[in-house]
Image (cartoon, coloured by chain):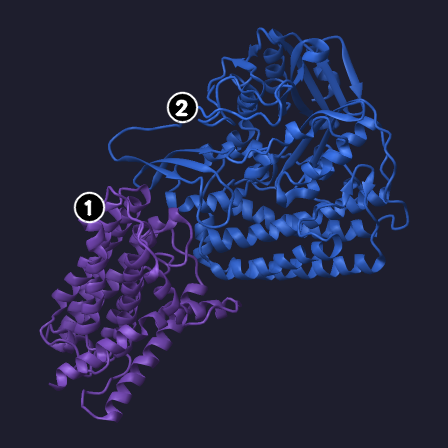
Chain colours: A purple, B blue
Amino acid sequence: MITILMLIIQVILVLLIAPFVTGLIRWFKARLQGRQGASPLLMYFALLTTLKKEHVISASRSWMFRFVPFMVLGVAVFLALSLPLVFSDGGIAHVDLFVLAGVLALSSVFLVFGGLDAATAFGGMGASREMTLAALIEPAVLTTFAAFATVAGSASVQSLFGQGMTALTHPALLLSFSALILITLAENARYPVDNPATHLELTMVHEAMVLEYSGPYLAMLEYASSIKLTVFLLVLGNLVWIKPEMYLDAPTIGLGVLGVLVSVCVGSFVLALLESSMAKMRFFRMQEYMSIAFFLALSGLILILVV
Amino acid sequence: MTYEQIQPLLPPRVSVHVDEVRCQVEASAFAPLVEKLSKEAGLPVSLVYATDDRVQENTFGVHAVLSLDEESRWLVISTSVEESNAQYPSLTASVMAAHWYERYLQDMFGITPEGHPDPRRLVHHENIPEGTHPLRKDFAWDTKLDHAQIPYPMHHVEGEGIYEIPVGPIHAGIIEPGHFRFNVAGERIITLEGKLFFTHKGVEKLLEGKTPEEALPFIERLSGDMAASHALAFCQAVEKISGTKVPERAQALRVAFCELERLTMHIHDLANIAGMGTGYTLMAANGFRVKERLVRLSQSLLGNRFWRGAIVPGGVTRNWTMDECAHVKAVATEAVKEIQDLVAMAMQSDGLRERLETSGVLTHEAAVAYGAVGLPARASGVMRDVRLVHPYAIYAELPWKFVCATQGDVYARYRCRVDELAVSLDVLLAALDLYPETDVTTPIDLKDGVGIGAVESWRGEVLTVVHLKDGKIERCMPRDPSFCNWALFGELGPGNIVPDFPLCNKSLNLSYSGTDM
């Protein structure tokens, strides 16, 4: 009973703050670049406005085009549910690292379907880039998860990212943690892999795939991106400080919520700082970036197995 | 090459006016002569244009303007073709730089350059009916055209894994319309071609029959970011025809306006290339803020944000007070210092340098062959600058320095802009102190004739040819540097990857409007 209650608290909290996180990153970026910046709450209004607009959908689309937003949003909500985000033993117990990696890939694949179904040059271009990146990042994702699983002695995501696990639990986990940061940037289409704020169709990856979406579908996809980013920031936060075990009283819940807010604020600031101080990487240098992520993860895993 | 050396190639009868040498040849001798002058004597072909002389001589005129850089003279080779047989052997077959000019006059005048390697339409899109030649004198400017469907084929590559990306004419962001067609293998660009001329304004047609004063506002609005340069080139052409001597102070202020325009746009480009082109947004946010200072300076001095309305035939509208000069100096110095600090910081970023270096290389051979002008040409080692080869205003008295590079990549163009920014500020500061007490305007006694005005704008060489008759403009071709440089994309694009194209594009920063007169 308490598990279900805590799960509800977690999912509501994450879904509620997700647009704020995206807005907050934009606001931090604006301030860091010397601009005034729009309110961090703007994203809520932007989503509501998009939600109210009508669809413009070409007649030549298949059912897949309409299905994709539901799938992608579904995966995002699943992530918000299954991982231990507010309490260290929250989330769904039976989800293990392979399910997690699979679900992440599922979301990418369906986004790609959405991009291809439009049969436009940009959709196809974005889809081909996304698949290239997904193929390059996949080994790093699995290796990183494997390193955490080895230390935790269990494949369940609760023991991987919760239950007292931090990046310092095993010294070699620092390497895996660094790999996880690189994965977070790549999975969420952030710098230096992709530019979330670009208006240039020719350089887009994630944005190119969703270029044909409008109205509520676009709102769903954007909301899904926000949720996914929030979840990743919370997971990274989990590995830096320990969250309380779930217990149904005000101080514990308060502590959990506070932990979430601190995680997203610090995470957003670091992300904004990163995005304000570097240029986007040339697309043909991506394999170097992904190799760094993979070798960080691999070194972490080897050290854990050897030491 | 000096004039003495090329004189044997020219026909015996030539006419000379100030720095222009003109001669008339038969249509069949036109291409061979220009080819000889271009290939053997190495004179760059700066402009090819046509005139409709059917009223006086019952023929169309075709004129090639070559630059005799060494002696700062222009050489104009003209020929005439009959309306019944409006064709001549094409120059482009041997002189690449003429390729767009000849397609242009084919559309606008219905004169066929025979043997042109690429005789497709240029200005006219699918919807313009056959036989529409707007610059002929018997074509009324307000003619309503029927809607035609004539193919406008673009380069197309076939093969396994090759696909086409059509981009534009409507773009994301607030830029002008232009269509680009990429043929791509994976991410690698194989061919790249542009289709422009979506917003033809008919400026050349509208200029005809107007006095220079009436024409000036049209010239200034050709391309919003180089109003001062276009106005100066036009005024210089008119003044040359009339033999007007512009007072020194006016010339100093003209230099000041052009340099302020150069500062404004170089700051814009430095911010735009590093900021928007690579995603180093810090540079864009701050660079555009710095640019805004100069734009507001224009607003406070001239009442508009485009350095427009100051240069007029015979001088400039008014002299600046000492206070205004001091203000301009202070704002410009501050803005340049600020952008230099920003650039110094941006250049510390390896990621940014890595994006700029080796992207969009324009080889020296291509730059020369295509007749590239301005900063892109100089970044590829072309040693031409109008201020060097055809000095105007009072650049000779100012601490002006030639800026160039040899690598020809985006980084070279970026460095050239950085270097030119410093030179430009020095020139501006010195120009404001020159001859403070003299007049700034002189009356013009309009005469009939033809004149060429050339100005090195921030974008490159502006060349304006004016034909005056009875105090009115008979024909005027204000050639924007973009017209020469647009075709360069076909050269510097292939080999790069698609996501780097916006960066290459921004490093040239060409005008759609200026090309699309």
Decide if residue B349 is on the left or right side of residue B224: left
Relative height, residue B477 to residue A81 (above, below): above
Residue that label 1 marks: A62
**Looking at the picture, which amino acid does disc 2 mark?**
Pro
- In three-dimensional space, the C-alpha distance between marks 1 and 2, rounded to whole angstroms, equals 32 Å
Q: Position of residue B372 (x, y in %)?
A: 57, 32
Looking at the rendered structure, the number of numbered marks drawn on it comes to: 2
**Looking at the picture, which amino acid does disc 1 mark?**
Ser
Decide if residue B349 is on the left or right side of residue A127: right
Which residue is found at the position 84% from the left and 58% from the top?
A: B322
Residue that label 2 marks: B151
Badge 1: how crowded within 10 Å, few (<14), some, or many (20+)? few
Numbered disc 2: what chain?
A: B
Secondary structure, mark 1, is loop
Residue B422 has which mark? Answer: none
**In what quadrant of the picture does the N terminus of chain B appear?**
top right
> Are the residues flagged by discs 1 and 2 in contact, CB closer than 8 Å?
no
Which residue is found at the position 75% from the left and 45% from the top?
A: B255
Q: Quadrant of residue A74?
A: bottom left
Q: Quadrant of residue B194?
A: top left
Residue B490 shows up from this direction = yes
Which of these two is toward me, A104 or A57? A57
**In what quadrant of the picture does the C terminus of chain B appear?**
top right
Numbered disc 1: what chain?
A: A
Which of these two is toward me, B66 or A85? A85
Which residue is found at the position 26% from the left and 85% from the top?
A: A256
Relative height, residue B472 to residue B217 (above, below): above
Which residue is found at the position 41% from the left and 64% from the top?
A: A275
